[in-house]
Image: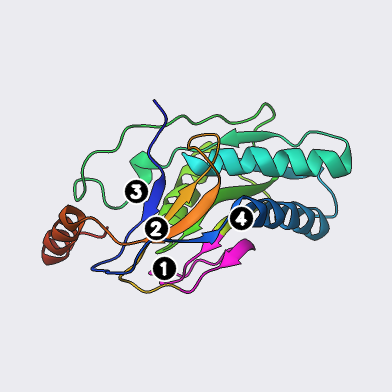
């Protein structure tokens, strides 16, 4: 069974679902990000791509393929599960552990590019930085995201952004990728009523959702 699409939720909303990025938009954004990574790092040699499950892994693979088409070489690519490093453990329903796969050669002295689908509060990326610290000592860590929707709660900024998407805190952003879903798309939609009730309950106890 494919994992459910990643969603980045906010409190109450009444907006009808709308597609803000389609397959062509996503393809162009990833191609641009791949070129920006090469330009900033003067080639692919120091780069290691680590996707944050779930859809960050699919995005990292697509970026790897685009870099390979330009550089005629494969960039080490893996995945980084941040579940046990999150600061909301015990405040939200338990998450299933995902797979961490560090490429041969590790990350020491490398430029690690974290890849995620949506940048929101910044707490997932904070967890990823903690996880990286337990694995090795890279030369630098950079961040590539398909969508930056704003509303940061921590001082974290993406180095490569496919789309800056102004959103309200009453909207939910959902990323669909063909590796896991029926098609590629980024959709803004209303939250189910049950999710709104859960959010209000979490807010009352200080939980961060």
Give me the C-alpha separation between circle 2 and circle 4.
Answer: 15 Å
Q: Is residue 149 magenta?
A: yes
Q: Is residue 98 left or right of residue 186?
A: left
Which portion, as a residue range, is magenta?
147-166
Q: Position of residue 113 (x, y in %)?
A: 64, 49
Quadrant containing the N terminus is: top left
**Mark 3 and mark 2: Cα distance apart in space:** 7 Å
| Number of the label disc, if any, that sits on residue 144 | 4
Residue 122: image location, x then y, percent: 43, 61
Residue under the point 88% across and 36% down: 72
Q: In the rendered view, does 152 fall on the left or right side of 137?
A: left
Q: Is residue 48 visible?
A: no
Question: Foreground mark, 3 or 4?
Answer: 4
Q: Nearer the viewer, mark 1 or mark 4?
A: 4
Q: Quadrant of the C terminus?
A: bottom left
Tag 1 near tag 2, CB within 8 Å: yes
Q: Are marks 3 and 2 in contact (CB under 8 Å)?
A: yes
Question: Tag 2's secondary structure?
Answer: helix
Query: Reading the chain from its start, which is encountered first: label 1 or label 2?
Result: 2
Question: Which comes before the other along the chain, label 3 or label 4?
Answer: 3
Residue identified by numbered label 1: 154
Give the CA separation, mark 3 to mark 1. Answer: 13 Å
Residue that mark 2 sits on: 123
Relative image position of residue 97 (x, y in whole percent): 36, 32
In magenta segment, residue 99: no
Earlier-in-chain disc, 2 versus 4: 2
Residue found at x 11% / y 60%: 201
């Amino acid at each position: 069974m494919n994992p459910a699409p990643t969603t980045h939720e906010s409190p109450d909303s009444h907006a009808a679902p709308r597609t803000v990025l389609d397959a062509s938009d996503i393809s162009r954004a990833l191609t641009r990000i791949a070129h920006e990574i090469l330009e900033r790092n003067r080639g692919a040699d120091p780069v290691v791509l680590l996707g944050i499950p779930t859809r960050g892994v699919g995005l990292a693979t697509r970026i790897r393929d685009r870099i390979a088409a330009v550089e005629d070489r494969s960039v080490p690519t893996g995945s980084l599960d941040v579940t046990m490093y999150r600061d909301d453990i015990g405040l939200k329903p338990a998450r299933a552990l995902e797979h961490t796969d560090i490429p041969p050669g590790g990350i020491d002295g490398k430029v690690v590019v974290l890849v995620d689908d949506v940048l929101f509060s910044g707490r997932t990326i904070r967890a990823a930085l903690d996880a990286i610290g337990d694995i090795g000592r890279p030369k630098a860590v950079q961040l590539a995201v398909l969508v930056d929707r704003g509303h940061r709660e921590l001082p974290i900024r993406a180095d490569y952004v496919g789309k800056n998407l102004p959103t309200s805190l009453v909207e939910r952003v959902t990323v669909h990728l063909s590796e896991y879903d029926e098609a590629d798309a980024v959709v803004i939609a209303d939250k189910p009523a049950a999710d709104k009730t859960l959010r209000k309950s979490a807010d009352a106890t200080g939980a961060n959702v």
